[in-house]
Image: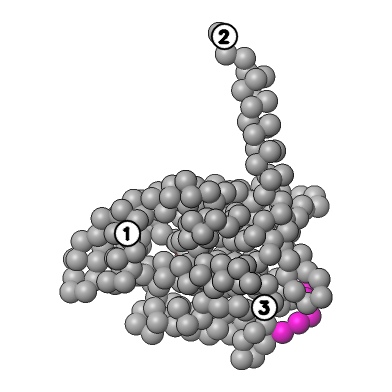
C-alpha cells in the first residue's frame, strides 16, 4: 500500500484531538515537566488518577537534563537514590552519602514510566492563567507556546481539573499569576510569594519537602517552586528533594481525591 500523506496528517490530527478533548476535564493538572512535576505525574497515574502535565518547552525534563553546569550527571542523597533505584535507574555512590545518576537516563525513565502509567504530557503548551471560582482554582488557562513567543493576540483555551500542581520551578509562574490577578492571599506567612533565597543545599533539601503543600485553594506547590513560594533556599544540582516532593504532593492530592 502506497503511503498517503493526507492519511498521515489525518491520523495525527485525529488522535491528538481525541487525546486533547479527553483531557479537558481531569483530576490533576500539573504545570511543568521538571523532575518534581514528572514524579508527581508518575505517582498519581499509578494511583489511577487522570493526570496531565503541561510543559512550555518542546522537551520535557526541566532543569534535570543539564545536570550541573551542563555536566549531565545529577546528585541525590540516599533517599533520592532509593527512589531512582526503585524506578530502575542506576546510581553510583561517588562521594560519601552522595549518589550520582546519568541525567538523561533519569529524565527519559521518569517520562517513560509516567506515560506508561497513563499520565499525558502536553508539551509546547504554556499555562498563562488559572480558572477560578469562589476563591478556588479549578483549572488552567492554556495557549500554544508559539502564540506566547510570537506575542500574538489569540485567546487561550481551558482545562478543568480538581487540583493543580504548581511545578514551574524557580519562576513560580502559576502562583505569580494568582497573586497578581486573583485578589486573594496565598497560604504563605505574608500572603504573597516569599521569594527564593541564595544557595544552601542542606537547608533547601529539607525545606523543599516541608514546603510541598497547598499554596492557594486548589493549588499545591512542588519542587523548587515550593521553596521559592515559602521563602527558602535554592539547592543547585541535587535532585533528591525534587523526587520526594513530587511523591509527597501526589500522596496529598490522592488522599484529597479519595475523600
Ligand atoms: O525547573 P524545573 O526542572 O522544576 P522542578 O521540578 O526542578 C528544579 C530543578 O530542575 C533544579 C533545582 C533543584 O534540583 O533547582 O532547577 O522544581 O522544571 C519546571 C518546568 O516548568 C516549565 C519549564 O519549562 C520547566 O520545564 N514551565 C515553567 N513555567 C511554565 C512551564 C508555564 N507557565 N507553562 C508551562 N510550563
- From the viewer's perspective, is residue 125 above or below residue 179? above
Question: Where is residue 206 shown, x and y percent of the image?
Answer: 40, 82
How far apart are the two marked residues, 2 and 3, measured between alpha carbons?
55 Å
- Left or right, 128 with reference to 37: right
Mark 1 and mark 2 lie on one chain; the one further toward the N terminus is: 2
* Closest to the observer, 95 or 247: 247
Mark 2 and mark 3 lie on one chain; the one further toward the N terminus is: 2
Q: Is residue 183 magenta?
A: yes
Mark 1 and mark 3 lie on one chain; the one further toward the N terminus is: 1
Quadrant placement of the C terminus? bottom right
Q: Residue at x 24, y 66 (%)?
A: 99
> Dot 3: within a 10 Å radius of its alpha carbon, few (fewer than 14), some, or many (20 or more) residues?
many
Name the main secondary structure of what is drawn in magenta: loop
> Dot 2: within a 10 Å radius of its alpha carbon, few (fewer than 14), some, or many (20 or more) residues?
few
Q: Is residue 196 something one can see in this rendering?
A: no
Residue for badge 2 = 2
Residue for badge 1 = 86
Mark 2–mark 3 contact, CB under 8 Å?
no
* Span colored in magenta: 181-185
Query: Ligand 1: does it lie within 8 Å of the C-beta at label 3?
Result: no
Q: Is residue 24 something one can see in this rendering?
A: yes
* Closest to the observer, 258 or 230: 258
Q: Residue at x 59, y 61 (%)?
A: 30
Question: Where is residue 68 shown, x and y percent of the image?
Answer: 34, 63
Question: Where is residue 96 shown, x and y percent of the image?
Answer: 18, 74
Residue for badge 3 = 216
Q: Residue furthest front?
A: 259
Instruction: Give SS at disc 3.
Output: strand
Instruction: Give SS at disc 2.
Output: loop
Amino acid at each position: 500500500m502506497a503511503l498517503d500523506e493526507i492519511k498521515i496528517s489525518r491520523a495525527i490530527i485525529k488522535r491528538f484531538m481525541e487525546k486533547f478533548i479527553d483531557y479537558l476535564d481531569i483530576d490533576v493538572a500539573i504545570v511543568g515537566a521538571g523532575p518534581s512535576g514528572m514524579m508527581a505525574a508518575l505517582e498519581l497515574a499509578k494511583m489511577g488518577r487522570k493526570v496531565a502535565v503541561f510543559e512550555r518547552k518542546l522537551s520535557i525534563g526541566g532543569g534535570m537534563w543539564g545536570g550541573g553546569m551542563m555536566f549531565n550527571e545529577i546528585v541525590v542523597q540516599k533517599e533520592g537514590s532509593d527512589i531512582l533505584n526503585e524506578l530502575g535507574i542506576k546510581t553510583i555512590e561517588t562521594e560519601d552519602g552522595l549518589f550520582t545518576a546519568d541525567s538523561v537516563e533519569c529524565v527519559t525513565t521518569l517520562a517513560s514510566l509516567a506515560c506508561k502509567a497513563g499520565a499525558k504530557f502536553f508539551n509546547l503548551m504554556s499555562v498563562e492563567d488559572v480558572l477560578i471560582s469562589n476563591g478556588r482554582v479549578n483549572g488552567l488557562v492554556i495557549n500554544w507556546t508559539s502564540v506566547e513567543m510570537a506575542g500574538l493576540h489569540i485567546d487561550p483555551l481551558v482545562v478543568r481539573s480538581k487540583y493543580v500542581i504548581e511545578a514551574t520551578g524557580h519562576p513560580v509562574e502559576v502562583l505569580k499569576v494568582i497573586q497578581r490577578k486573583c485578589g486573594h492571599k496565598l497560604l504563605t506567612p505574608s500572603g504573597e510569594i516569599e521569594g527564593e533565597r541564595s544557595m544552601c543545599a542542606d537547608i533547601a533539601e529539607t525545606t523543599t519537602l516541608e514546603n510541598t503543600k497547598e499554596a492557594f485553594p486548589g493549588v499545591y506547590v512542588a519542587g523548587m517552586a515550593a521553596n521559592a513560594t515559602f521563602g527558602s533556599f535554592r539547592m543547585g544540582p541535587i535532585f533528591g528533594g525534587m523526587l520526594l516532593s513530587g511523591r509527597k504532593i501526589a500522596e496529598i492530592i490522592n488522599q484529597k481525591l479519595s475523600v
